[in-house]
Image: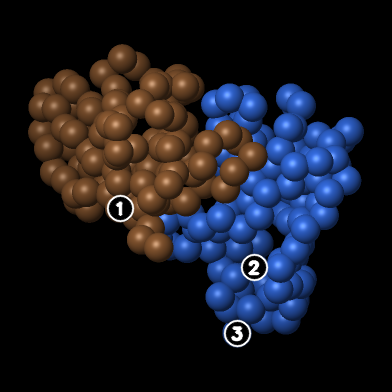
Chain colours: A blue, B brown
Amino acid sequence: QQPVQSPQAVILREGEDAVINCSSSKALYSVHWYRQKHGEAPVFLMILLKGGEQKGHDKISASFNEKKQQSSLYLTASQLSYSGTYFCGTGSQNFVFGPGTRLSVLP
Amino acid sequence: KAGVTQTPRYLIKTRGQQVTLSCSPISGHRSVSWYQQTPGQGLQFLFEYFSETQRNKGNFPGRFSGRQFSNSRSEMNVSTLELGDSALYLCASSLGGTNQPQHFGDGTRLSIL
């Protein structure tokens, strides 16, 4: 079953923060996050493997709450280059992506 | 390290024809997954191959098939093309397992007339 992402879209100004949520009605074994810019392939951001795990690089980080079956992606002090569609993905066998969150960062 | 290579980048076909798409994974990656991406349905999993064996399969009709060769290169075939098959087809390679990051190719844009 496909994870649910919220919000569907968000518009930010440079320097603002954003949070993208991913939740599932089924147990989450691991959560992947990818970003896809228009006309390009999805690019891997990070994987969270355990409940409670938090990761980050640069100003993008994520957390994984296994009990609540949800993950959140945090974008801090957003830059123009952060614009794109963010997908979470999960699956123990068949890998399933969420519908995506379109993020637009304006100058 | 060379990335994932998909060929061709663009294809135009007519209904009823068949098509074969190719994917060369990153060297050392034994898992290749295929996805269909459309504006309405998002990224949908087609199937995954690992060491020449189909390990997982998504919910697509039998017209969609694939195979993997001993060098891990993979092909996807779609027979009896329908208008609804127009999409971006992406392949992704990884070391294997859902705990490994997937590295995507640029995709093949398939248009059905």
Q: Is residue B109 left or right of residue B13?
A: right
| Residue at the disc numbered 2 | A11
Quadrant of the frame with the C terminus of chain B? top left
Amino acid, disc 2: Ile
At a point 74% along the width and 32% down the height, the residue shown is A28
Amino acid, disc 1: Thr
| Residue at the disc numbered 3 | A107
Q: Which mark is residue B5?
A: 1
At a point 34% along the width and 16% down the height, the residue shown is B61
As drawn, the residue found furthest toward the top would be B62
Q: Are marks 3 and 1 in contact (CB under 8 Å)?
A: no
Q: Nearer the viewer, mark 3 or mark 1?
A: 1
Chain of the residue under label 1: B
Secondary structure of the residue carrying tag 3 is loop
In the rendered image, residue B84, in percent from the top left (x then y), is placed at: 29, 31
Q: Nearer the viewer, mark 2 or mark 1?
A: 1
Q: Nearer the viewer, residue A67 or A98?
A: A67
Q: Earlier in the sequence, mark 3 or mark 2?
A: 2
